[in-house]
Image (cartoon, rainbow, N blue to C red):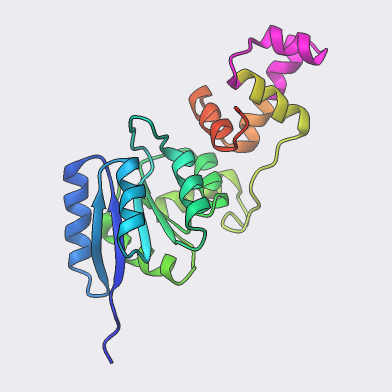
Amino acid sequence: METQALNVIIADDHPVVLAGVRAILNAAQQLHVSAEARSVNEIYARLADTPCDVLVTDYSMPDVGEADGLALISEVRRRYPLLPIVVLTMMANPGMIQILLAHGVLALVDKSSSMDELPTAILSASRRRRCISASFRSKLALLHPTGADAAPPPRLSPRETEVVRMLALGATPSEVADRLGSGTKTVSKQKKDAMRKLGLTTDAALFEYVRAQGWLG
């Protein structure tokens, strides 16, 4: 008996990438592209009006009025908690990869390597199985040399959480130190410790993490 093809919504703000993904999936007998989206708003619209078994979305897709990245993933999880999500990204940061997995993303495909992995990733996600590009697995192994795939999501101490939250809200290290009754060197160390635990290397990545956690408002 012939198996019914999975309905897949694909999303990317670059038409060339979208066309490439469409071609790859159209060549896979078990997959059917049911809709395409080029913005965050279009993703929400297509999910609302189109059958979808798996969502394949770019990670970074700036849109007027709607946040992308982790905020997009979190919102899709809130609206469609059972929908498998596959993320396409060129992100090289192992901490952010682990954070995406902790947010319920089932498959991660490296856009900078062969997209031949995508059909397998979609089928795995549809079966609730995790699938990660080989290049990403090697990055996770650097963060957690043993048991990388099964490693728990990073946890910050209450003080580290408060420090990074206040810094993300725009406070200077001196202002944070004054409010918490500590020194600027202590604040700086707590920020560095937090970034090390999360595997983040830039302030922008730290801000994105804080925003996705809902700590800004």
Q: Residue furthest front?
A: 49
Q: Main secondary structure of the magenta part?
A: helix
**Residue 123 locus on image (x, y percent):** 37, 69
Q: Relative to the observer, which residue lies in front, 211 or 138? A: 211
* Residue 137 appears left or right of 210: left
Q: Residue furthest bottom?
A: 1
Q: Is residue 183 above or below residue 88?
A: above
The residue drawn where x is 41% and y is 37% is 68
Q: Is residue 172 magenta?
A: yes
**Residue 12 locus on image (x, y percent):** 27, 45
**Residue 54 locus on image (x, y percent):** 37, 62
Q: Is residue 158 above or below residue 90?
A: above
**Residue 216 locus on image (x, y percent):** 60, 27
- Quadrant position of residue 64: top left
* Residue 130 appears left or right of 120: right
The residue drawn where x is 55% and y is 47% is 98
Q: Relative to the observer, which residue lies in front, 90 or 67? A: 67
What segment carries the magenta color? 168-191
